[in-house]
Image (tube, helix red, strand yellow):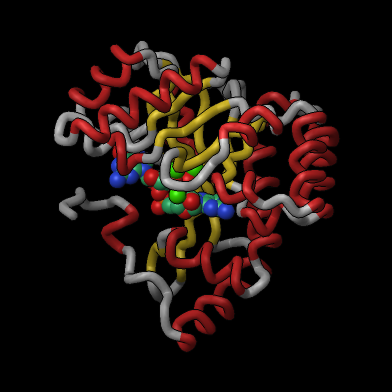
Amino acid sequence: KARGRGRWEVFTPPMAETVEEKRRIEQDLRRALDTGGELRLEYQPIFATDGRTVAGAEALVRWEHPERGRLAPDVFIGVAEERGLIERLGEWVLEEACRMLARTTIPWVAVNVSPVELRSRRFVDRVIEQLRQLGIDPARLQLEITEGVLLDTSEATEAGLTRLRTAGIRLALDDFGTGYSSLNYLRRYNVDKLKIDRSFVGQLGQSSDAEVIVRTIIDLARSLNMKVTAEGVATEQQRDYLVARGCHELQGYLLSQPLPLEAFLEFTGIAA
Ligand code: C2E
Ligand code: CA
Ligand code: CA
Ligand code: CA
């Protein structure tokens, strides 16, 4: 995995696996959540297919650990889910993203939501309340959920999704193609957007299977009147293929890495 310096992956230790390591992350994350000072959000611009217009951004959480440096979310999100910290982390992310929406003219921001959070009534209430308090148009918030969420037929999840949709919040299906979505669920919850997983995008030009999958997802989204975004667009060849096939939005290192807020505003020219 050859990646440039300064990217998060460079600092990524292997997934937290041992009990010891998980306990350590849990403890440190509790402290980080108490103080709030070590966490921040970065924003990765998502472009319309003209490659110039910024459609919106995905918010990605970062943790600046005092001793270990930057920890990638893949390392601590799983631990937060397992150890009951994901709701607090999710609330922090949501508040931060809503403040960003309130103070800038960005069309929308997408926030990743863990399946655990969606089952929580408190979480759903807070999302809706937060938007109302800050006077933000709910259509400016997109929640990125994974396919597994739609397969969770528990009443709590169903009720949560329905309430979020009724409030006007947008739903995007993340990592699409890697799970087991039933097409039925896409309709049932009125999903607004599919995000093609970067594992397929990364193989464009190398694997004809990947091309077929990407093309099929784009056609599916368009036929169901959904938006479709390609993640992990890293080469011009990939971009050209996606644009030619009618993909609506592009996200990836070719266009921009995730950026701290000030750098994001400067790069995109979005007014604060
Ligand atoms: P994701 O939702 O699929 O987010 C996209 C990931 O792809 C991000 O990694 C982003 O930095 C990376 N990426 C963007 N463009 C490219 C590219 O061109 N090539 C490659 N190889 N990667 C690219 P990141 O920031 O390390 O986040 C990893 C995962 O952690 C996310 O995957 C998401 O599942 C989770 N995550 C991040 N922030 C949050 C959060 O606030 N809450 C929750 N629940 N999960 C989060
Ligand atoms: Ca995502
Ligand atoms: Ca994704
Ligand atoms: Ca992911």
In the image, 45 versus 146, the foreground residue is 146
Placement of 160 over or under 83, stated as above or below: above
Q: Quadrant of the N terminus?
A: bottom left
Q: Is residue 217 left or right of residue 151?
A: left
Q: Where, by quadrant of the figure, is residue 235 drawn?
A: top left
Placement of 41 over or under 22, stated as above or below: above
Residue 118 in view, yes or no:
yes
Q: Position of residue 167 (x, y in %)?
A: 81, 30
Q: Position of residue 202 (x, y in %)?
A: 25, 38
Placement of 73 over or under 257, stated as above or below: below
At a point 33% along the width and 71% down the height, the residue shown is 14
At a point 34% along the width and 16% down the height, the residue shown is 51
In the image, 117 versus 73, the foreground residue is 117
At a point 51% along the width and 37% down the height, the residue shown is 58
Q: Position of residue 200 (x, y in %)?
A: 30, 38
Q: Is residue 7 left or right of residue 20?
A: left
Which residue occupies the extreme bottom position in the image? 20
Q: Is residue 50 left or right of residue 157?
A: left
Q: Is residue 89 left or right of residue 177?
A: right
At a point 31% along the width and 43% down the height, the residue shown is 199
